Image (spheres, rainbow, N blue to C red):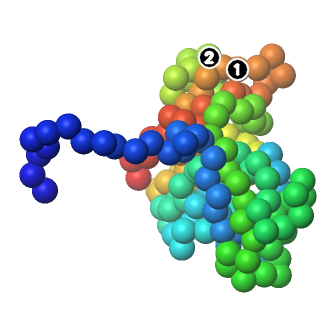
Amino acid sequence: MAALTNSRNTPELSDSGRMRILGVEANTNIYLGGIVAIDANGYAVPASATTTTANALRIVGRAERVVNGIPGENALNNPGAAGAISITARKGVFLYDQDNSITLADLGMVCFAIDDHTVTATDRASGASVQQYAAAGQVVALDPSGQVWVDFWHQATAAA
């Protein structure tokens, strides 16, 4: 496409993309408050590690509420077809567990999701040859509890 030669009306999402409604993958349970990812099929799944291939999950935020299900309940789509229920994933800065690898030196750096409630400083387990953990977001602060404040607005892809 050619570059603009005049001004352009560029619409913005009403909530700036803070919340996304995603269909839940078949036979999958997502628990409210957990870290939500999109799988290779475009459906929501809980964040998780892979062991044999580079992690293709893309983290989208915190599980907020169920759509087409029971409000205030977890997204229980097991058994269920892909997209039978949906979950709202919210971007923001949220407090999550960590594996004790994140220190003050990691402030402003990308952290990675080990599972749906735990982050780590590295994109793979010791000795692994492929990226096992999806980029979760930027480390904002360490909480006195040992947990980490993660900014889901700022993510990056790790080099595999």
Q: Are marks 2 and 1 in contact (CB under 8 Å)?
A: yes
* Image x and y of residue 29, in percent: 80, 66
Q: Is residue 53 visible?
A: yes
Point 88% across, 58% down: residue: 71
**Above/below status of 119 relative to 59:** above
* Of 98 and 44, the residue lying toward us: 44
Q: Tell me which amino acid carries mark 1.
A: Leu
Point 71% across, 33% down: residue: 94
* Image x and y of residue 117, in percent: 76, 45
> Mark 1 highlights which residue?
142
- The secondary element bearing badge 2 is classed as helix
* Of 124 and 6, the residue lying toward us: 6
**Above/below status of 3 relative to 140:** below
Q: Is residue 112 visible?
A: no
Label drawn at residue 65? none
* Image x and y of residue 1, in percent: 13, 56
> Mark 2 highlights which residue?
104
* Of 10 and 38, the residue lying toward us: 10
**Above/below status of 60 relative to 120:** below
Q: Check disc 2: other Cα within 10 Å, few if <14, some if 14-19, many if 20+.
A: few
Q: Tell me which amino acid carries mark 2.
A: Leu
**Above/below status of 38 relative to 127:** below
- The secondary element bearing badge 1 is classed as strand
Counting residues from the start of the chain, the first of labels 2 and 1 encountered is: 2
Point 79% across, 68% down: residue: 68
State the separation of the CA atoms marked 2 and 1: 7 Å
In this rendering, which labeled residue sits more in front, label 2 or label 1? 1
Q: Is residue 48 left or right of residue 14?
A: right
Q: Check disc 1: other Cα within 10 Å, few if <14, some if 14-19, many if 20+.
A: some
